[in-house]
Image: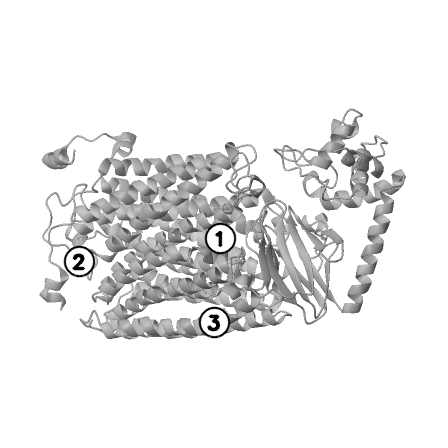
């Protein structure tokens, strides 16, 4: 199929309309599909977050009933993690990995098509549970048993099916990414010459292959408990509810890094471009990423400090968790060293990348606080935790995804994003996101538990701020949609091949917009170590 | 550069808004912004640990962001900055790997000490078994043969905004846990249904209550007072509505309270033997209904169909044929629905009273009287 495509060039007959998108095996089109699905899910999950924030705007049950509130917090988490952030990174991987390593396409194009189209099915099933009798999942995105088994609504089996499909999609996508990176690099590009985005995705893909089957296992055990009378997690039948948490977090903690490592790769591409200076400490960035990935397998029980682990386990997981701060710190220091003595300008992608560095660091530092097990007895399951992981995921991962969109949109569409809209989007997002999540540190420390639809009066003021910020942040994302639509309609300043003055990498040798088929023959690649201009 | 200035103007306006909002919050917030210091040695240790690590993190943030913003300011392209060509330095990498490692070790030492103390629940003076229920707490004084449920004390009308919210909205219970100061109390935690977590910030105890497991924790409270907390693990629809109230009292007051509890238990036992008048049953039944039933079936018996059926005009509750089925439902619950079994939760008098109330309130007017003895007989048949 691939050789046929190459032979016919861009003139081969292509199905039109919906069939084109259903049948496409082109990495750029599939990348676009992933990104659009992710954007749609971002708004679906975001709407749920705003329902939550509307209820929490003031004390009292004012807007929804507690049962529906729980469905909203649960679905918000599931949709954002599995529907918005992960597909966004897979979409970026699809678009960028082949063009960054000089490959004509992904290694397994049909598998690529299948991986994508599993997702709309998965999320249709997942969202349909909201309309079933007894409602959708209402047990939190971490779905702790036995609340999610013995005490779950009847729709839970559909939730499990949806998660299985999303999981299969991730595993297949990861296999494809590994096969592409290991086999299709242009000659002379060694692993240690690859752009960091490719590196971070290679490591992320291995994480996915390692942990998605664990998720599949744990939800299958749930399915058996619910429908076939087993008692994996049912204490009355000799089962163990804590086993669920061990299995879930053995998946769940690496999952957290799956959602942030590709972001590190994006920032490592953008910061050098606009500092006009080579990334500081390339090798240490690779090693730091790999260390974070390895450590992510031995820290899972820091999510379980209050379940009553023995003291030695508590100490082990506290120390191993604290260790993660070291390679993470190295990454932040390297970015700052890249800025140091650069020639810095502040285009849209750079603004998002710089905001990422600051806000991600705030989330990282509250992570260090949470690692301290005795203090975690006070932080655990409060809004302090909500503040922490949202700082890593929203002003962190989401900002990195937005930075990537602003950075590569000229390559994808051939026009620069609208600067005025982009700036408004940036500043409103920064204000909105910090207004939403910063006060949560205080409400959490003051004692507000997470996942409650109603709260004591002393938390009222912080919640007003968070709700105002949430709506501001949510509404400002519409500006991003406007930016994307303008680019897609080619309204805006035309971009040359080298869209950003200081950008490095094979993708900038391609015309803007990049044609459907690129690098039919492997491009010439001069490793940085051999390039005289860079030393 | 023009575009950046445009951005800065935006920023100033919004920053101004943010500052006024935060100031407003600071003035209005009666309770703190920070973790409470608490009233036990451990809670104070945890608080100091929290503050030390917080200030270390602030210092790190200041240094990192300081260097970052200084670089952003000084090396602007618009000011003619030319980029340097260096891109690696092993010495620097080693330094900024080693320094954080040392800081972490410095944090780990006191944390380890505190953790060891928290885990030493030996040589306790008394034991209290805490059992989580959907959605209430059950306390059992292991050495005293005293046990009771502790329910949300805030009326539903406050939750729904029909009435002004009290000072301890959602943090008050009908019957608090009473404990003596100065004694080492060991708490044992378990659950009857799903996982809950028993959390009282001032005591710095947060422990999951897990069905089939028994967790433990301990406390010595220094100061008499009322310490409030909440369930901290999502446990279903009324997760937000199962607060904790711990009343720490002097040892003399505690002894008197124990005596009072024993008398009440004796009176209760006697009560379940005798014949009750309709009015008596109705009065008690209304209280039980408000605490245990109204959250789902509503104060006026209208329910929230289809999940929570109406009791008003329900043939099960009004008609003669429904009589035994009604009692059975309250005692053993309805499998496959949210209706729990109350045979272990409520006393026979409570069960008799609430069924009587349901069969006579809101125009149901069946005139039925269910006696505690009838319930006792049914239960002893099993």
Q: A351 or A74, which is in the foreground?
A: A74
Dot placed on the residue nearer the N-terminal end, 1 or 2: 2
Q: Do the residues marked 1 and 2 share a common chain?
A: yes
Instruction: Name the disc covering residue A471, or none.
Output: 1
Q: Do the residues bearing badges 2 and 3 touch, measured as CB atoms within 8 Å?
A: no
How many marks are shown on the rendered structure? 3
Identify the residue under disc 3.
Answer: B53
Residue at 22%, 44% in the rendered image: A179
Chain designation of label 1: A
> Which quarter shows the N terminus of chain B?
bottom left
Which of the two residues, A165 or A342, is positioned nearer the viewer here?
Answer: A165
Question: What's the mark number on residue A193?
Answer: 2
Compute the Cα span from label 1 to label 2. Answer: 43 Å
| Position of residue B349 in the picture relative to residue A77 (left or right) | right
Q: Is residue B246 above or below residue A146?
A: below
Question: B145 left or right of B198?
Answer: right
Residue A81: where, in percent of width, then height?
Answer: 41, 48
Q: CA distance from mark 2 to mark 3?
A: 39 Å
Residue B316, above or below A494: above
Name which residue lies at 49% across and 57% down.
A386
- Front position among marks 1 and 3: 3
Q: Is residue A425 visible?
A: no
Chain to which mark 3 belongs: B
Question: Which mark is nearer the camera, 1 or 2?
Answer: 2
Left or right, B277 with respect to B11, comes to: right
Secondary element at tag 2: helix
Image coords of residue B273 (percent x, y):
87, 41
Question: What chain is tagged by disc 2?
Answer: A
The verdict on a common chain for dots 1 and 3 is no
Q: Where's residue B284, x and y in %?
A: 82, 44
Distance from label 1 to label 3 (Cα)? 32 Å
């Amino acid at each position: 199929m691939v050789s046929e495509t190459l032979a016919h060039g861009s003139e081969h007959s292509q199905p039109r309309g919906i069939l084109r998108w259903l049948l496409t095996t082109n990495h750029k089109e599939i990348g676009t599909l992933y990104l659009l699905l992710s954007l749609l899910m971002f708004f679906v999950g975001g709407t749920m977050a705003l329902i939550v924030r509307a209820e929490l705007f003031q004390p009292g049950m004012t807007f929804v009933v507690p049962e529906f509130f729980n469905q909203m917090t649960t679905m918000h988490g599931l949709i954002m993690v599995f529907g918005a952030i992960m597909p966004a990174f897979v979409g970026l991987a699809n678009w960028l990995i082949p063009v960054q390593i000089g490959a004509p396409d992904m290694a397994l194009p049909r598998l690529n098509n299948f991986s994508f189209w599993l997702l709309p099915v998965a999320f249709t099933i997942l969202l349909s549970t909201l309309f079933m009798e007894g409602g959708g999942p209402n047990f939190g995105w971490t779905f702790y048993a036995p609340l999610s088994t013995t005490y779950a609504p009847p729709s839970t089996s559909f939730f499990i099916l949806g998660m299985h499909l999303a999981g299969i999609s991730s595993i297949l996508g990861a296999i494809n990414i590994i096969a592409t990176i290991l086999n299709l690099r242009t000659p002379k590009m060694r692993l240690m010459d690859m752009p960091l985005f490719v590196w971070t995705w290679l490591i992320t893909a291995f994480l996915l292959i390692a942990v998605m089957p664990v998720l599949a296992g744990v939800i299958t055990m749930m399915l058996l408990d619910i429908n076939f009378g087993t008692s994996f997690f049912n204490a009355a039948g000799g089962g163990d509810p804590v086993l669920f948490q061990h299995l879930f977090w053995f998946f769940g903690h690496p999952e957290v890094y799956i959602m942030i490592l590709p972001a590190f790769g994006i920032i490592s591409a953008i910061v050098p471009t606009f500092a006009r200076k080579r990334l500081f400490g390339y090798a240490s960035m690779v090693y730091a990423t790999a260390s974070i990935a390895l450590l992510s397998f031995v820290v899972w029980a820091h999510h379980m400090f209050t379940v009553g682990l023995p003291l030695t386990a508590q100490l082990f997981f506290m120390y191993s968790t604290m260790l993660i701060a070291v390679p993470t710190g190295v990454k932040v220091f390297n970015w700052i060293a890249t800025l140091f003595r650069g020639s810095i300008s502040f285009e849209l992608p750079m603004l998002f990348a710089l905001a990422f560095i600051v806000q991600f660091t705030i989330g990282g530092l509250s992570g260090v606080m949470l690692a301290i097990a005795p203090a975690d007895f006070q932080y655990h399951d409060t809004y302090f935790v909500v503040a922490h992981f949202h700082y890593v995921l929203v002003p962190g991962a989401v900002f990195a995804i937005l930075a990537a969109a602003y950075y590569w949109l000229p390559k994808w569409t051939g026009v620069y994003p609208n600067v005025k809209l982009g700036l408004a989007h940036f500043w409103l997002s920064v204000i909105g996101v910090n207004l939403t999540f910063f006060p949560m540190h205080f409400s959490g420390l003051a004692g507000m538990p997470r996942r409650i639809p109603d709260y004591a009066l002393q938390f009222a003021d912080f919640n007003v701020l968070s709700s105002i910020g949430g709506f501001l942040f949510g509404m400002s994302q519409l500006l991003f949609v406007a930016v994307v639509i303008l680019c897609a309609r080619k309204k805006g300043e035309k971009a040359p091949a080298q869209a950003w003055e200081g950008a490095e990498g094979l993708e900038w040798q391609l015309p803007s917009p990049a044609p459907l088929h690129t690098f039919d023959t492997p491009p010439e690649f001069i490793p940085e170590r051999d390039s005289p201009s860079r030393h | 550069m023009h575009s950046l200035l445009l951005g800065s103007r935006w920023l100033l306006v919004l920053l101004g808004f943010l500052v006024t909002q935060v100031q407003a919050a600071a003035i209005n917030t009666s309770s703190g912004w920070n973790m409470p210091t608490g009233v036990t040695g451990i809670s104070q240790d945890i608080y100091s640990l929290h503050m030390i690590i917080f200030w270390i993190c602030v210092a790190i943030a200041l240094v990192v962001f300081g260097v970052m913003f200084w670089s952003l300011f000084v090396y602007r392209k618009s000011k003619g900055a030319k980029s340097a060509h260096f891109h690696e330095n092993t010495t620097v990498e080693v330094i900024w790997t080693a320094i954080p490692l040392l800081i972490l070790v410095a944090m780990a030492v006191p944390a380890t000490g505190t953790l060891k103390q928290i885990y030493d629940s030996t040589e306790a003076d008394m034991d209290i078994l805490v059992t989580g229920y959907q959605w209430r707490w059950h306390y059992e004084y292991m050495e005293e043969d005293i046990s009771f449920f502790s329910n949300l004390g805030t009326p539903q009308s406050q939750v729904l905004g029909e009435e002004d919210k009290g000072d301890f909205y959602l943090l008050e219970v009908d019957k608090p846990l009473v404990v003596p100061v100065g004694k080492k109390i060991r708490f044992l935690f378990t659950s009857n249904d799903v996982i809950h977590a028993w959390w009282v910030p001032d005591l710095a105890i947060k422990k999951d209550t897990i069905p089939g497991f028994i967790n433990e924790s301990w406390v010595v409270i220094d100061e008499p007072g009322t310490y409030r907390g909440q369930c901290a693990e999502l446990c279903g629809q009324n997760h937000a509505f199962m607060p904790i109230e711990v009343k720490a009292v002097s040892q003399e007051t505690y002894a008197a309270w124990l005596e009072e509890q024993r008398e009440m238990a004796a009176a209760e036992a006697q009560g379940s033997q005798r014949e009750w008048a309709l009015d008596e049953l109705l009065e008690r039944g209304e209280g039980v209904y408000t605490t245990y039933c109204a959250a789902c079936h509503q104060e006026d018996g209208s329910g929230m169909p289809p999940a929570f059926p109406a009791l008003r005009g329900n043939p099960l509750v009004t008609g003669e044929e429904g009589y035994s089925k009604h009692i059975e439902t309250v005692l053993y619950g309805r499998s496959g629905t949210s209706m729990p079994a109350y045979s272990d939760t409520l006393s026979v008098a409570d069960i008799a009273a609430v069924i009587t109330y349901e069969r006579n309130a809101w125009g149901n007017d069946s005139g039925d009287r269910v006696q505690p003895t009838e319930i006792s007989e049914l239960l002893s048949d099993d």
